[in-house]
Amino acid sequence: MQTPHDRFFQDMFDKKIVAEEFIKNYLPQELLELIDMDKLEISKKSFVSKHLRKYFSDVVYRVQLNKHNAYVYCLFEHKSYPDKDVSFQLLKYMIRIWEHHQDHYDEEQLPLVIPLLIYHGEKRYNIGKRFNSMINTQPNTEKFIPDFEYLLFDFSKYSDLEIIGSIQLQIVLKILQTSFIDNNYDKIFTDILKLIKKLNDTKTILEYFTTGMEYILEIKDYDFDIMHDKVNLIIPERSETFMSTANKLREEGKLDGIKKGIKEGRKEGMKEGRKQELIETISILIKDKLPIDKLPDNLESKLNKLDLIVLREIRTDLLKDIINIESLEDLEEYLN
C-alpha cells in the first residue's frame, strides 16, 4: 500500500518542471556542465524493494551526459532518523538500473548512475556518504572494495533562503522540509499557501494545492479548522477544493482518526530512534573493549531484536564494567 510520503514524492518529482528545476538548482555545477537538460526523460520504474517502500521512494531520470546515456537516481528517505544501510541500498538499486539498461540498450559500457539521497527527518544526518564506510577494510585491500559517494540533500536543515528554484519546486521542498516540524507550523502553512498563490494559472494552482493539502492533511497533526481559516484568508477561491479534499480523505477512512495515527506513528518513530541510538552506543562501547571495527551482522541483528529496557541494561553494564567481555564469543554468550 502506497504511503502518503511515497505518493507525494512520486506525484511531484515525476513532473518534468520539478525534475528539471531540482537538477539545475541542486546538482554540482561540474555535473550540470556535462548534462544536456533537453534530453531529460523521467522513468516510471521504481527500484526500491517492496518491503522498504514504507520508508523509501525513488525516481529515475535518464539524461545525456557528455552525449552518453546516464541516470540521476533520487532516493527519498521518509524516516524521522537516518538509515545506516542506505549506501548498501543505493548500490543494490544502481545495479538494478544497470541490469535494466542492459536489457534495453546494446552498449559496450555501463552508463554512469549518479546516486542522490533526499532526507527530511528529525534526527541529524550523521551517516557516512561513501560506500566504503560500511566495509570492514584492512590495509592494502582498497582495490577490492567497490566504492562511490552519494549526493545528500538534507532539506530538514535548509533555511528559507536555501530553498530555491521555480515556485513549483519551492512548494514541493517546503512541504517536504517541514513534514516532521510542529513548532510554528502556523507560519509554515501560511508560507506554503502564499507560494501556491504565486502560481500563474488556475490549473497549476489547483494541481499543487490539491496534492499538497492531501499530503499535509494525512501526515500533520495540525488543527483542521485553522487550516481551513488560513485557506479562506489567503486563497479563498480554493476553500471549496480544500473541503472536498478533506471529505475525500474522510470517505477513504484516512482523515478520521488521523491524529491518533500520527501520534502513534511519531511515538513509534521516536522509540525506533532511541533504539538505534542505544545500539550505536553499545557498539562503540564494545569496540572499545574488543579489537574490532564493526560488530558482526549476527550480533547486530540480535541487538536489533531486543527491546529498549534490555538495551539500556546492556549499556549500563558496559559503562560500569559489570560484564567481562574479552572476545566475540563472550559477547555472544552474554547476549544469549
Image: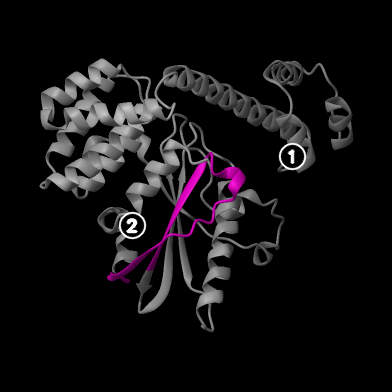
Image colouring? one colour
Label disc, if present, on residue 252 of the rendered structure: none
Viewer-closest of 289 and 10: 10
The reply, left or right, for residue 327 in relation to residue 122 is right
Residue 68, image quadrant? bottom left
Q: Is residue 98 above or below residue 293?
A: below
Q: Is residue 11 above or below residue 70?
A: above
**Of helix, strand and loop, which one carries label 1?**
loop
Q: To which residue does mark 2 refer? A: 27
The picture places residue 336, in percent across and down from the top left corner, at 87, 27
For the point 35% across and 48% down, the residue is: 11
For the point 33% across and 33% down, the residue is: 214
Q: Which residues are magenta?
A: 34-62
**Of helix, strand and loop, which one carries label 2?**
loop
Type of residue at label 1? Leu
Residue 153 falls within the magenta-colored stretch = no
For the point 50% across and 38% down, the residue is: 126
N-terminal of the pair, mark 2 or mark 1, is: 2
Q: Is residue 243 above or below residue 171?
A: above
The picture places residue 58, in percent across and down from the top left corner, at 46, 51
Q: Is residue 129 above or below residue 268?
A: below
Type of residue at label 2? Leu
User: Does the rendering let one see residue 180?
Assistant: no
Extreme residue toward the front, this view:
251
Nearest-to-viewer mark from 2 and 1: 2
The reply, left or right, for residue 282 in relation to residue 12 is right
Q: To which residue does mark 1 refer? A: 295
